Amino acid sequence: MHRTYFSDIPRFFVVLILLTVFAWGCAPMQQSVKSVDMLSTPNLLMEADAAWEAKQYESTELYYAAALDRQDLVRSELPLVYGRLAESAYRNGHYHQARIALEKWANQDTSALELASWETIYLNTMAALGKTERLHNHLKWLQDSTKTPWTTKQVVALWYSDYFRKMDDPERSLDVLSEYYQQAPEPSAKAGFEQAFRQQLAESSESEIEILSKIVDTTNQWQFPYALVSFEQGVRIAVDADTWSSAWRTMRNLTTKSSLVDTMSLESVLVDLEARYGVPRIGLALALPITGPYAKVGVKILRGAGLAQWRLAQNGIEVDVRVINTEISGWQTRLAELPSHYSVVGGPLRVSAFKQLYEGENSDQSVLKERAVFTFMSSLGELTEGRDAWRFFASRNDEVRSLVSMAVDELGITDLAVFYPEEKFGRTMAETFYREATPLGGRIKGMQSYPPKNLKKWSKRVGKLLNVPADFSENKDVPLEMPDFGAVFIPDGWRQAQTLLPNFFFYEGDQLVFLGPGLWSRALDTAKGIDEHYYRLAVCPGAWWEQSDGGRALQTALTEEGLGQADFWVALGYDFIRFAGRLGSLPSTWTGRDVNSRIHAAQDMDFSIARLTWDDSGVASQDLYLFSPVRNGKRLINAEKISSRISQASARREKRMGAYEKRMKEQGYKLSEDGQWITIEEKTPDMPPEQ
């Protein structure tokens, strides 16, 4: 690419420098100024070289500027003269003079731009002059340049990285390194680049490393330069015993899983740190039902946990996992008696078991005080989430929010109803739906309960919700009025739903969208032979989708180890062990705030279930998938298809209405002003006699 620069250095340039130096009143320099014109060009260059070696940049600038005005200056001397003049002028704060010298040099020899020395002085000068746009343009030019050697590009990349960091743009600071790294011609060049950036990081302040570390996430954590930022952060916090465990885990992962070329130097640093601070012991406990009615679920969780433990061990992270059977009397005492390094607990799975940790004569509240407990439940009940304990499970709010958001935002249905069983779960979910719908744009237009065990009453309760006339059974040919809502939430199990939904169709509710809880989704994982006719407009949330990236990765890992089929519970155990391993062992004096701080970093991982996130106060939420039942299970919803089916159902209803009206008119009836069918001869009470 051709570049144009100033063609001449102004002749007043030397005079300006002489006057400036003279004005400073520097006595030793006055003698030099007087002798410049008396020196021959070779002697002038000798004086300039001596001043350069002595780092006397005022004199250096003076002598080299004077040399450029000599007619007998040998052309081969120009690169050195221009380079040293530019560097001296820059150091003296004469940025315009430095720029002119560089541009003169480039015009005289375009290959100067391929030199790291030219680029460094030029970039420093442009930054000092505040030439932001020129710097951005120059960066783009260099990235596209095929003539600039890699050694120069590496220097430029590191310069720009530092520049963007100082300009409060840490994301661009790392991006530019990533972009140049991809241009490295061979692995050895990449290794040298990694080492140079590591040195730059080592010279950075704590706050600079902290800012850069916030740019690292699951999409880039194993790549250059992000992996080195994480490693350097680990080096910085290793001195703190309370953070050494989590830092060690991160650094160990980086030495084995990153795509860096030079991992040996990282391994060397980690070995030194391990010798100084010891190898942390990470102990995790799982409180699960291993016997009894819920043993099947507990065993599945353990299968996923075992796989995660094995995978972590392959990456050099040894995690001790202790299993406590919550179906055996006194389990909470055995959990409390575990060694202190078992500081994180997964489970329990059931509310009754969880309450044994803090209610009743046999409770052992020390577990919640001494260990961070992550329950596999939707709620902690009366306890405060993020302080007393934590969740590793979707909440009722997560389920409701996902359903209402889909209905309102994707289907345009704002009028909603709730049809719930008269028992604790149903009432709680109904209350949650009522509370969460309004902020999301929904309006509750109907709410009806039904006795969960009295199936004979279910049809009448559905009719009551739909405002079906009492004489419907005697006038089944009369089309029913459309309900004033477009979707109904039914917080009950899948088995109950299979009996309930046909009642809505009996009352011509086939245009309604049926919203179910997560119970439906988990049941559909093993369901077969579903009558799709009743569920074409049914939607339920779930945390597990086998075709997600995480789901496929888990199944691949299970298959490789011969551990069978993945499902939600297997995925839950697999994700929890990997998540808890990232937390590391907690210090004996940990607080809820300490745990929440560690969660902030640990949650940035690849989940096999739907991603869980925790806010700063430690409250978990999960971005759930939404499914529709199909013949042999479930599939992700397609909002456009559902909208189309609603339109088709409404069109069928309108067609029925039209046919009914036509039939009534053919039979000698007409529609009165109040919407009643009357015979043509019959007069309505308010109509005047015919004239």
Image (cartoon, grey):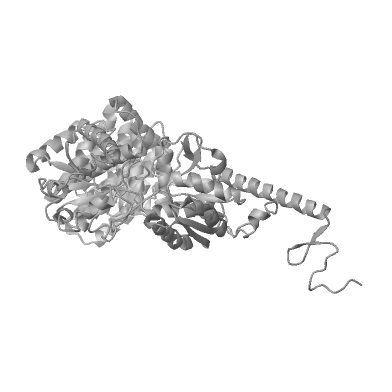
Residue placed at 79% from the left, 69% from the top?
684
Tell which residue pokes out farthest to the left in this image.
Answer: 276
Kindly indicate the quadrant of the structure image that contains residue 193.
Answer: top left
Image coordinates of residue 336 in percent, x first then y, are 13, 50
Between 364 and 176, the residue placed more toward the observer is 364
- Residue 34 appears in view: no
Kindly indicate the quadrant of the structure image that contains residue 287.
Answer: top left
Between 540 and 426, the residue placed more toward the observer is 426
Image coordinates of residue 561 in percent, x first then y, are 28, 26
Image coordinates of residue 373 in percent, x first then y, are 22, 51
Q: How many marks?
A: 0
Q: Quadrant of the C terminus?
A: bottom right
Q: Is residue 26 above or below residue 283?
A: below
Tell which residue pokes out farthest to the right in this image.
Answer: 691
- Residue 467 appears in view: yes
Between 487 and 78, the residue placed more toward the observer is 487
Image coordinates of residue 301 in percent, x first then y, are 28, 38
Left or right of 678 on screen, residue 42: left
Left or right of 679 on screen, residue 363: left
Between 440 and 634, the residue placed more toward the observer is 634
Q: Is residue 488 above or below residue 580?
A: below
